[in-house]
Image: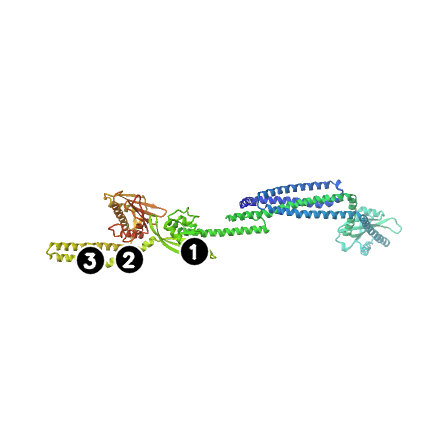
């Protein structure tokens, strides 16, 4: 049995050589078939004539016919043998179509063999009966009588012509129509007799052979008659009556020449009258055919035995040649049917394997050709549908690939089918190890528990969409992720796989908390700052009024300390409220072209005098100019350096180093500013809340510095991230966009 690979290989081979080899093979087959058919037709056409001519053993032409027939049979045997060998090899190799070819050929051989045997038997029987009938009946006697009858007919015509000629000659002589001056009367008399006796032509010649008068049948005027030659006229002038049959257009002329004597009892011939009776062409042809048939019969009669013995030989040879030729034609017809089917099968295998770019060459306009054309149209439609699906798939993949949210598609067994880069980033894994594996085996910790819980609830519960918010550590930072799991159903409602969407809402929650704190700060600054000035003034007034009136020193000292504390705390509250106000209402950015490296160098110079901390810089050369609010970005750098210095001071022993670096990411179009310290470092939970207002890891911090830093960076369309440093400490990474 043919395998798909065999069919595909055969299709590839046949398709590659079809255009040229197929045309050459078919041209060769047509030439061979035409030659054989012409030879067979010639043999069939020549056989009766050759048989009739003479016996088989003495006829060289018959031997030539037999030699040609044997050569033809040898050619057919060679062609059939080659095709049979090829067919056997194809069947052994299991090539598609070999069995169908075998059935076709056997069917042709069976049908043609039965037909040839029946035709041979019936032809032999009929020919033998016909040959026996020829020689058993008195055919020869009938033919001889027919010839005698035809000859009698011509003799009667000649006698009638002589009788009419004698009458006309006698009347011309008796009436003296040959005398000088009798020419008009002679013409009238000749015309009258021509019409009276229904003659085709009547002519009168004088003794010198010149035409004296003549009359022609008007109805036969279109027939070209030959005038008698001078020899015939000369014999008539010698007094000899004679008849003659001459050919004429459209028939024959029975001609009689009768002399006209000078007078009664005279032996002198004065003229000759020529009588022409017209015999139609059909009568002459029938007579000729009868005579030819009699001659052929007389030649054939001695070869009766040879005919009976050679007839089965001729019939057998022709039957064998016809059988072989029909079998060869069967091979060719079977090939013409099975080869397109074989190519169709190979192309169908290619289509089943996913190759829709196949094309089967159409080799005819019959039903097979129509089938091939329909297959090509179907393949084209499938190819167009596949291309359209591929375009839509690529569009969908591009959308999923570029969305910020993570998207994962799973089948019913939780096996990963697709996963976009955002999901890989949010889950902190590589993509290659995910495809084709169960997702609960790849995740761990809170992510694994969350997803497994959602998928199980979807599988057994009536709900189609489930959501859950969890916090996980991602890239050393505590992130808040929203998980949304959706059950997929087919068009007919059957359960399919799952789609999981992961949204990182860390920045959104941070922005929401920042906005809420900003509103609180604005209210606090408005409600508390106004009473602070009267409190401070009242404390100062009490100090001035009571200081001189108190007698004991202890009371004066107490008054001084109390009013000073009130004044100091009021100033502290005012400073805090100023920070609240600055956080709530930061001034609008005023960007201008700024060289970030120069700005970093300017700020670093302020810290060069710090003796216990090593400040290092690693500034990338040739950074592009950025559109920045110089003062606000300077405030960002100062705040980050202050935090780094405080963290190192809190860390105690160990390396005391602050490193400031800049770099350019041309692909993303951003400039990164990194401040790394070797301080105490931060836990993931602390990093998550680090940029929230009023959250601080320092004992004396207000918690607004990094919140303001985050706000400034955001106003510049940038981002700020915090990561751990090695071997210890913290790294703050600020990314600012390059101006267009």
Q: Position of residue 554 (x, y in %)?
A: 12, 54
Q: Which residue is mark 3?
A: 533
| Quadrant of the rendered image containing residue 48 | top right
Q: Is residue 706 visible?
A: yes
In three-dimensional space, the C-alpha distance between marks 1 and 2, rounded to whole angstroms, equals 45 Å
Q: Residues within 10 Å of mark 2 (few under 14, many from 20)?
A: some
Most foreground residue, 117 or 262: 117
Q: Residues within 10 Å of mark 1 (few under 14, many from 20)?
A: few
Tell whether 80 sits left or right of 445: right
Circle 2: element type? helix
Q: Is residue 226 visible?
A: no
Q: Which residue is mark 1?
A: 460
The numbered mark, 3 or 2, whose residue comes first in the sequence reads 2
Circle 1: element type? helix
Q: Position of residue 258 (x, y in %)?
A: 84, 50
Q: Position of residue 279 (x, y in %)?
A: 78, 52
In three-dimensional space, the C-alpha distance between marks 1 and 3, rounded to whole angstroms, equals 67 Å
């Amino acid at each position: 049995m043919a395998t798909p690979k065999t069919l595909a290989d055969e299709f590839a081979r046949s398709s590659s050589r079809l255009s040229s080899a197929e045309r050459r093979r078919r041209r060769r087959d047509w030439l061979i078939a035409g030659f054989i058919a012409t030879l067979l037709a010639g043999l069939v056409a020549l056989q009766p004539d050759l048989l009739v001519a003479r016996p088989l053993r003495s006829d060289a032409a018959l031997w030539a016919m037999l030699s040609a027939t044997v050569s033809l049979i040898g050619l057919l045997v060679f062609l059939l043998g080659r095709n049979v060998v090829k067919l056997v090899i194809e069947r052994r190799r299991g090539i598609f179509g070999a069995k169908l070819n075998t059935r076709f050929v056997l069917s042709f051989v069976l049908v043609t063999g039965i037909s040839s045997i029946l035709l041979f038997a019936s032809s032999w029987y009929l020919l033998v009966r016909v040959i026996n009938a020829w020689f058993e009946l008195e055919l020869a006697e009938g033919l001889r009588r027919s010839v005698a009858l035809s000859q009698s007919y011509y003799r009667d015509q000649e006698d009638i012509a002589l009788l009419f000629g004698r009458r006309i000659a006698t009347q011309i002589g008796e009436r003296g129509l040959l005398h000088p001056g009798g020419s008009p009367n002679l013409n009238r008399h000749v015309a009258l007799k021509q019409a009276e006796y229904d003659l085709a032509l009547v002519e009168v010649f004088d003794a010198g052979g010149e035409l004296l008068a003549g009359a022609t049948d008007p109805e036969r005027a279109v027939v070209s008659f030959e005038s008698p030659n001078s020899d015939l006229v000369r014999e008539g002038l010698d007094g000899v009556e004679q008849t003659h049959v001459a050919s004429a257009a459209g028939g024959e002329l029975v001609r009689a020449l009768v002399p006209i004597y000078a007078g009664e009892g005279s032996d002198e011939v004065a003229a000759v009258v020529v009588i022409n009776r017209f015999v139609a062409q059909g009568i002459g042809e029938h007579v000729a055919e009868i005579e030819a048939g009699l001659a052929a019969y007389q030649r054939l009669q001695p070869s009766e035995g040879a005919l009976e013995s050679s007839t089965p030989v001729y019939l057998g040879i022709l039957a064998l040649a016809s059988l072989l030729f029909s079998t060869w034609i069967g091979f060719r017809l079977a090939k013409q049917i099975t080869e397109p089917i074989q190519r169709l099968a190979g192309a169908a295998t290619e289509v089943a394997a996913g190759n829709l770019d196949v094309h089967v060459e159409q080799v005819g306009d019959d039903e097979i050709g129509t089938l091939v054309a329909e297959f090509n149209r179907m393949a084209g439609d499938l190819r167009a549908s596949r291309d359209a699906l591929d375009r839509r798939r690529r569009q969908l993949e591009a959308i999923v690939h570029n969305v910020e949210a993570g998207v994962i598609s799973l089948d019913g067994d939780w096996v990963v089918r697709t996963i976009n880069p955002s999901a890989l980033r949010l889950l902190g894994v590589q993509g290659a190890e995910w495809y084709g594996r169960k997702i609960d085996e790849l995740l761990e910790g809170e992510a694994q528990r969350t997803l497994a819980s959602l998928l199980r609830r979807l599988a057994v519960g009536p709900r189609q969409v489930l959501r859950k918010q969890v916090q996980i550590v991602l890239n050393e930072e505590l992130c808040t992720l929203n998980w949304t799991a959706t059950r997929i159903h087919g068009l007919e409602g059957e359960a399919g796989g799952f789609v999981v969407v992961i949204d990182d809402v860390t920045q959104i929650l941070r922005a929401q908390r920042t906005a809420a704190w900003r509103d609180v700060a604005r209210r606090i600054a408005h409600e508390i700052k106004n009473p602070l000035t009267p409190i401070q003034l009242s404390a100062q007034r009490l100090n001035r009024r009571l200081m001189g009136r108190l007698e004991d020193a202890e009371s004066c000292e107490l008054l001084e300390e109390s009013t000073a504390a009130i004044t100091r705390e009021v100033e502290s509250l005012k400073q805090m409220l100023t920070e609240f106000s600055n956080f709530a209402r930061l001034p609008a950015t005023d960007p201008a072209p700024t060289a970030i490296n120069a700005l970093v160098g300017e700020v670093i110079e302020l810290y060069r005098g710090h003796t216990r901390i090593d400040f290092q810089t690693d500034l990338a050369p040739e950074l592009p100019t950025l559109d920045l609010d110089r003062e606000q970005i300077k405030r960002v750098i100062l705040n980050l350096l202050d935090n780094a210095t405080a963290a190192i001071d809190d860390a105690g022993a160990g390396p005391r180093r602050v490193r400031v670096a800049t770099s350019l990411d041309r692909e993303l179009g951003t400039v990164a500013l990194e401040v790394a310290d070797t301080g105490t470092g931060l836990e993931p939970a602390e990093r998550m809340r680090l940029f929230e207002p009023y959250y601080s890891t320092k004992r004396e911090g207000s918690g607004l510095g990094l919140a303001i830093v985050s706000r400034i960076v955001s106003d510049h369309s940038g981002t700020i991230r915090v990561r751990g440093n090695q071997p210890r400490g913290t790294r703050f990474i600020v990314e600012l966009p390059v101006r267009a």
